[in-house]
Amino acid sequence: MNAGGVEACEHAPRSPSIVPSNEQDVYLVVDDLGKVGTIWREADTEATDYENVIRDLLSGQYKNPVRVVSFNTAEGWSRDVSGEIAEELRQRCETVRRELAASLRPFVERFDKTIGR
């Protein structure tokens, strides 16, 4: 027993790690579901790279995205990439002459510094 009177569980099963095992940058989207609240959207671990997140946003898989965060556990960093993602979404829609989806418009307008120039 340790000092607190609790035995150490040397053979207890361990929970699987939620930390990605590869060294890729991971992108997660915070989505506002209205009355339900804001959530980190569930995503396949193999689909959290930059291109997949952009593709998912453009295809309308998020109701009302409010923030995008990126991290890399191998390199030990994390940061808010909402502005970069917003600009990329605007540029891609502009390139193909496609209007931004209504669900993306508030996100892009809030973070993309190039709007209104």
Image (cartoon, rainbow, N blue to C red):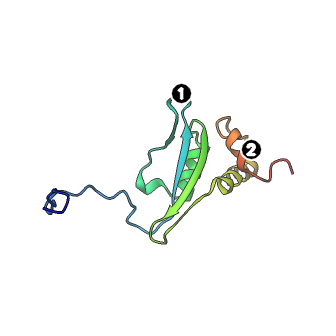
Residue at 74% across, 44% down:
109
Mark carried by residue 96? none
- For disc 2, the marked residue is 109
Residue at 14% across, 58% down:
7
8 vs 61, left or right, is: left
**Disc 2 element:** helix
Q: Earlier in the sequence, mark 1 or mark 2?
A: 1
Spatial separation of the CA atoms under disc 1 and disc 2: 23 Å
Task: Residue at the far front: name it.
Answer: 3
Task: Residue at the far top: name it.
Answer: 35
Q: Position of residue 35 (x, y in %)?
A: 53, 27
Q: Position of residue 82 (x, y in %)?
A: 64, 52
- Amino acid type of disc 2? Glu
**Disc 1 element:** helix
Q: Position of residue 117 (x, y in %)?
A: 87, 51
Q: Position of residue 77 (x, y in %)?
A: 52, 67
- Amino acid type of disc 1? Lys
4 vs 70, left or right, is: left
The tally of labels here is 2
Q: Nearer the viewer, residue 32 or 59?
A: 32
Where is 105 relative to 22, above or below?
above
49 vs 101, left or right, is: left
Residue at 48% across, 55% down:
48
Residue at 70% across, 39% down:
106
34 vs 16, left or right, is: right
- For disc 1, the marked residue is 35
